[in-house]
Image (spheres, rainbow, N blue to C red):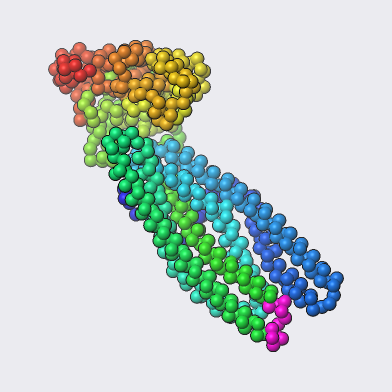
């Protein structure tokens, strides 16, 4: 079982259906629709309770010999049936519409919340589990709002109204019926507790299964390259079977509860009817009254049976609601300030790290940066070099405020990043990550992602500057060619050039390049390097690179080692110092490992 699932099982289980109160904020904007649905529900329940009275009148009317009166009884029954049909249809429309609207709002709220979470959040939870919450859990809630709650309320009204009408019809027989109630309630309470636990466990296994599948499918080429299909299939099958086993136990428990409740209910009714039949023979009640009592008894029994069945659905939905509310209320490690300071425009691009210490949440005992202070002047190009894990990429992630440092501060144009909204200062930054992200859309839209309002001509100019124009025009539909999920139609170097074109199009005052040319061949690298140098003019540029040939022309080179700055200087000065940079340079330039 994954760590994610294990963590989920350690969370408190849903103790009561009251957890559904978490849906109230989503229902509140549609209170008018909710009231109309409740009125339609009350109408159908009331008409249903009147119907047995009409049946009694019709049955006893056969003995009156008054044909006109009998016709009136039949007409009244027909009107009641019409009202019942109209009310039921109206209730279905209103309740179903309400359910769809609320669930759409919940899905949107969840996506909006998760999309703004910092990377630390995704270190604790798998993307597949989040998707399971948005799909599987909200589907459960849709079932409850659009059906189960309505049916439960209707049956509750039928139960209460039916019991009242039973009392009015025959107090003696109703007293006998009520003797059965404790026997019915006990299994509902006892087995209901077990159902709550099993429902929560089942949903956790479903989420784990989704997470496992998402991870495997997103890395399918690696799985196939290492011939790991059998193990991956086995791991997914194991999680899926555990999910099925949990569901089977839940279904079995619910089935047992349903059998017990329905049998006890109808067995009691049969016994009561036997006594009622004797009363009819003795003249203590009419045939119409007995039939009326029978109909009300069946209504009450059906309501009890339906409530026992719906109770399980409500418990499952309570568990789902609990998880969704938990996700919506998750605290993010990175928050925008309540009263943000606006970043002055135009942005100069002055960056400062002041005694910054940072540890990744998943590695709290290891410092990725330790007391780092660095000043980057506006328009300066600074290269960050050093061994893998030295802290270079961490500098860029902190500058984007994906994480907050444990101590020290980072400023842009003299303003602390934590004092501004993330969208404000990120709007002044263009970034090319080491692993370029290509979306499942056209090449043109992938580049336009950098600036949504850009024209087609501006998109193509950016592609030319990134040495991407030639291969993009060679695609079947040119710039309008669909690139596939994660850009499967492109090579690694082509993906990187599309990502560079996106950054060029953004035309931001600050440029961050994380191994931006690492996947390019020599010819493309020269073309892109020329474009990057031209793009860097007048912009503050931070370049992370292992290949030192790409950073020789930087204004300054900052050498990182074990989360600290080991040296700062130009290429020639650092080589002359004969330190870490000089050793890296000798390895690359002497051994030809450029």
Q: Is residue 113 above or below residue 461?
A: below
Q: Give the quarter of the image for residue 353.
A: top left
- Whether residue 550 sits left or right of residue 576 in the image: it is right
Which quarter shows the C terminus?
top left
The span picked out in magenta is 280-290
Judging depth in this view, the residue of 406 and 308 nearest the camera is: 308
Residue 230's spot in the image, x, y percent?
30, 43
Q: Residue at x 66, y 75 (%)?
A: 293
Residue at point 59%, 76% (across, down): 269
Residue 341: image quadrant is top left
Q: Within the image, what quadrant is residue 547 found in?
A: top left
Q: Position of residue 245 (x, y in %)?
A: 38, 57
Q: Position of residue 105 (x, y in %)?
A: 54, 43
Q: Residue furthest bottom?
A: 282
- Observer-nearest of 31 and 192: 192
Residue 514, can we see it? yes
Q: Is residue 393 above or below residue 508?
A: below
Q: Is residue 347 visible?
A: no
Residue 360 lies in the magenta-colored region: no
Q: Position of residue 579 (x, y in %)?
A: 15, 20
**Residue at 27% from the left image edge and 36% from the top image edge:** 226
* Residue 124 in the figure: left or right of residue 282: left
Foreground residue, 475 or 115?
475
Count of numbered marks: 0
* Relative vertical location of residue 459 with respect to residue 188 in this rendering, above or below: above
Residue that appears at 43% across and 63% down: 252
Q: Is residue 288 magenta?
A: yes
């Amino acid at each position: 079982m994954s760590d994610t699932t294990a963590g989920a099982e350690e969370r408190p289980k849903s103790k009561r259906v009251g957890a559904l109160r978490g849906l109230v904020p989503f229902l509140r904007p549609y209170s008018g629709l909710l009231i109309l649905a409740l009125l339609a529900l009350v109408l159908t329940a009331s008409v249903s309770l009147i119907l047995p009275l009409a049946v009694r009148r019709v049955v006893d009317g056969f003995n009156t010999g008054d044909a006109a009166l009998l016709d009136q009884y039949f007409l009244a029954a027909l009107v009641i049936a019409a009202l019942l049909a109209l009310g039921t249809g109206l209730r279905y429309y209103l309740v179903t519409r309400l359910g769809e609207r609320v669930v759409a709002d919940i899905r949107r709220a969840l996506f909006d919340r998760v999309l703004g979470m910092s990377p630390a959040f995704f270190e604790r939870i798998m993307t597949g589990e989040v998707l399971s919450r948005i799909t599987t859990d909200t589907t459960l809630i849709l079932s409850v709002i659009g059906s189960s709650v309505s049916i439960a309320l209707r049956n509750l009204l039928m139960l209460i109204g039916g019991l009242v009408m039973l009392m009015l019809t025959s107090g003696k027989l109703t007293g006998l019926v009520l003797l059965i109630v404790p026997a019915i309630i006990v299994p509902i309470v006892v087995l209901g507790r077990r159902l709550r636990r099993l429902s929560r466990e089942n949903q956790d296994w479903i989420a784990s299964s989704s997470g496992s599948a998402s991870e495997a499918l997103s890395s399918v080429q690696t799985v196939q390259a290492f011939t790991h299909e059998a193990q991956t299939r086995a791991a997914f099958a194991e999680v899926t079977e555990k999910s099925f086993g949990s569901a089977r136990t839940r279904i079995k428990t619910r089935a047992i509860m349903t059998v017990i409740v329905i049998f006890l209910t109808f067995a009691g009714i049969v016994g009561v009817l036997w006594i009622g039949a004797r009363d009819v023979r003795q003249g203590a009640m009419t045939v119409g009254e007995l039939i009326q009592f029978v109909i009300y008894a069946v209504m009450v029994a059906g309501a009890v049976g339906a409530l026992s069945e719906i109770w399980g659905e409500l418990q499952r939905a309570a568990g789902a609601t609990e998880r969704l509310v938990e996700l919506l209320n998750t605290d993010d490690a990175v928050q925008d300030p309540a009263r943000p300071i606006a970043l002055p425009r135009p942005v100069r691009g002055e960056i400062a790290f002041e005694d910054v210490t940072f540890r990744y949440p998943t590695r709290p005992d290891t410092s990725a940066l330790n007391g780092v202070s660095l000043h980057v002047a506006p328009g300066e190009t600074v290269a960050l070099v050093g061994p893998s894990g030295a802290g270079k990429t961490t500098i860029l992630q902190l500058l984007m405020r994906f994480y907050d440092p444990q101590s020290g501060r980072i400023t842009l144009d003299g303003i602390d990043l934590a004092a501004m909204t993330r969208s404000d200062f990120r709007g002044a930054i263009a970034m090319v990550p080491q692993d370029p992200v290509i979306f499942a859309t056209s090449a043109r839209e992938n580049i336009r992602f950098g600036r949504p309002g850009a024209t087609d001509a501006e998109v193509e100019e950016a592609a030319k500057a990134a040495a991407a124009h030639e291969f993009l025009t060679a695609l079947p539909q040119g710039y309008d060619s669909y690139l596939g999920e994660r850009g499967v139609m492109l090579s690694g170097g082509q993906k990187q050039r599309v990502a560079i074109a996106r950054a060029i199009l953004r035309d931001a005052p600050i440029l961050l390049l994380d191994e931006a040319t690492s996947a390019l061949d020599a010819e493309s690298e020269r073309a892109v390097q020329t474009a990057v140098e031209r793009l860097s003019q007048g912009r503050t540029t931070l370049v992370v690179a292992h290949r030192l040939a790409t950073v020789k022309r930087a204004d300054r080179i900052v050498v990182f080692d074990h989360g600290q700055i080991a040296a700062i200087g130009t290429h020639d000065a650092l080589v002359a110092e004969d330190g870490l940079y000089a050793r890296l340079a000798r390895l690359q330039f002497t051994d030809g490992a450029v």
